[in-house]
Image (tube, rainbow, N blue to C red):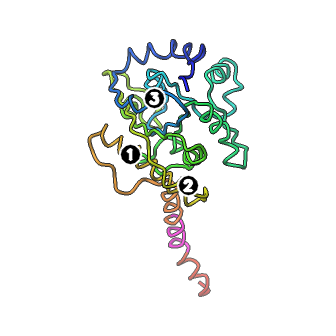
Amino acid sequence: MPRRRIGFWYRFAAVIAKPPLVLLLKRDWRGMENIPAEGGFITVVNHISHVDPLVYAHYQYNTGRVPRFLAKSGLFKKGFVGAVMRGTGQIPVYRESTDALSAFRAAIDAVERGECVAFYPEGTLTRDPDVWPMTGKTGAARVALSTRCPVIPVAQWGANEVLPPYARKPSLFPRRTVRVMAGPPVDLSRFHGKEMTPEVLKETTEVIMDAITRQLEVLRGEKAPEVRHDPREVRLEQRRRAARQTAEQTGPATAGEGNGK
């Protein structure tokens, strides 16, 4: 299957976005040979900054295989932004859908048409204290197993130095280096043919997150923690701690009331 034509709107967006990216940032790009030259595939990318979608899109635009991002459906309805989103072939996600597979049907269709669909499996900016990948959501695994397409892990580092996670003010000077590296396809063959149960999707997602993390270890030159940060576990522990504190504070008073004091 031939490469997809990039098209007017993607080229137009590149004309606007690339000059400031080239001017303000230095680049260390690796692994472009792992981006398939033809056919549908997905990329799975770590999320470290509000500006890293631009950095990653710049990287992949230069491979000739532009990514199609999943984005909130509301963005497709807003004037010029909506026109660009529609024109560049981004994929609307309708959050009101109660069927997870239906919500990703457009992504599956795009892959089957020979497109590249980009996923941020964490679903949000990492909350890991040291900016390592967190536990992932299962959307990318669902599309990968539905299509059996290549899954390319992409790690990036440096955009977080331009704009740290959840920060509002960028730091542009001195000029920062943004590093992006694509790895070889993730081997998910052992999951093919299995029913997509929650357990299978979770295990597939773990394999995907491990592959992204290995790429990031190379970029950072250090090992990731043995246990991946899980925001859900953090929230549960916070609730447990709050419940214990409440019990400790109300326990003596309750006991006193029971004694008629």
- Residue 169: x and y, percent? 44, 28
Is residue 15 depicted above or below 185 in this figure?
above
The C terminus, quarter of image: bottom right
Looking at the rendering, which quadrant does residue 2 occupy?
Answer: top right
CA gap between label 2 and label 3 equals 26 Å
Tell me which residue sits at (57%, 18%) in the image: 5
Residue 140 at x, y percent in the picture? 55, 44
Question: What residue type is disc 3 on?
Answer: Tyr
Q: Which residues make up the magenta segment?
A: 242-250
Judging depth in this view, the residue of 39 and 127 nearest the camera is 39
Residue tagged 3: 56
Question: Could you tell me which secondary element the residue under label 3 belongs to?
Answer: helix
* Above or below, 247 relative to 77: below
Is 243 inside the magenta-drawn segment? Answer: yes
- Location of residue 164 (image quadrant): top left
Position of 52 with respect to 83 (left or right) is left
The residue that disc 2 covers is 201
